[in-house]
Image (cartoon, rainbow, N blue to C red):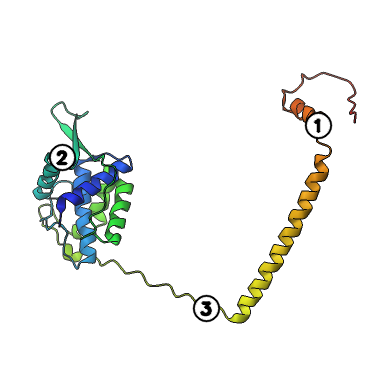
Amino acid sequence: MNLLDLIKYIVWYATQNEMKLTTVRLVKFLYLADLYYARVHGGQTATGFPWGFVHYGPYCSEAMDAIDNAVSDGIIDKKTYQSKFADTDEYHIFLCYDDEVEAPAEYLSAVIVSYLEQVVRKYGEDTPALLDHVYFETEPMLDVRPGDQLDFSLAKPIESLQPIEIKTLPKEKIELARKHIKRLAEKTKKETGDLVSENAEIAKWMDEKYYAALEYLDEEDLEPGLEGVARIER
């Protein structure tokens, strides 16, 4: 499993959707990638990280090391900013500006990628909602205490989609549908012809005086108080 490809794809997808990932968000998305993988692979994770309930929910130093490696190898970019809440605090934003990046399909199925992209779009710029999601809505975080290691065997399997059965219509119903379609087409053709004739008749009256009248109607309203008789000439 190429861990750096996974990190790059998450950061790239967020950047493509104009979202700037902080360290907390990126770590949580790596955790969710492991969770989705575990749901498909019987509790086995993609990264093999020993996730624990430490900082803001799921955390492990291995995830931080992997992110630092991705930055040092030039796979993703890191921008550092001064925190607005304390002079000594800094925070980081991770970006990836590659023109095109493919999901690491050798170990992430289309189902896992779909779930991962959906959660990035939903929580990519909403840290409180993301933390609520991983705290209260992911199986390994249920009924654990700070310091506990997370158990991904609790991940609920993703239900496979059942094929849709398409029933074959009887020959009689098919013939009846064809008759209705033919009748509708003939009616539409007749109504179209009538409309063309009507428009041609109306066009006879659309001379210079007609268009001049339209221009007068488009102008501002006359001032109130005017009196007189209007006469229309043909």
Q: Which mark is residue 74?
A: 2
Give the amino acid at mark 2.
Answer: Gly
Tell me the CA gap for discs 1 and 3: 58 Å
C-alpha separation, residue under disc 2 versus residue under disc 3: 56 Å
Q: Quadrant of residue 210?
A: top right
Position of residue 230 in the picture relative to residue 124 (left or right): right
Sequence-wise first label, 1 or 3: 3
* Residue density around tag 3, few if under 14, some if 14–19, many if 20 or more, within 10 Å: few
Q: Is residue 198 above or below residue 144?
A: above
Q: Which residue is mark 3?
A: 168
* Picture residue at 63% right of the left edge, 81% below the top: 172
Residue drawn at (19%, 68%) of the image: 42
| Image: 81 above or below 96 | above
Query: Where is mark 1, residue-wise?
Result: 210
Residue 126: percent from the left, percent from the top?
Answer: 30, 43
For the residue carrying disc 1, how many other residues have a C-alpha within 10 Å: few (<14), some (14-19), or many (20+)?
few
Task: From the top left corner, tell me how far across and down residue 149 is, in percent.
Answer: 11, 57
Residue 64 at what x, y percent from top left?
12, 45
The answer to whether mark 1 and mark 3 are in CB contact below 8 A is no
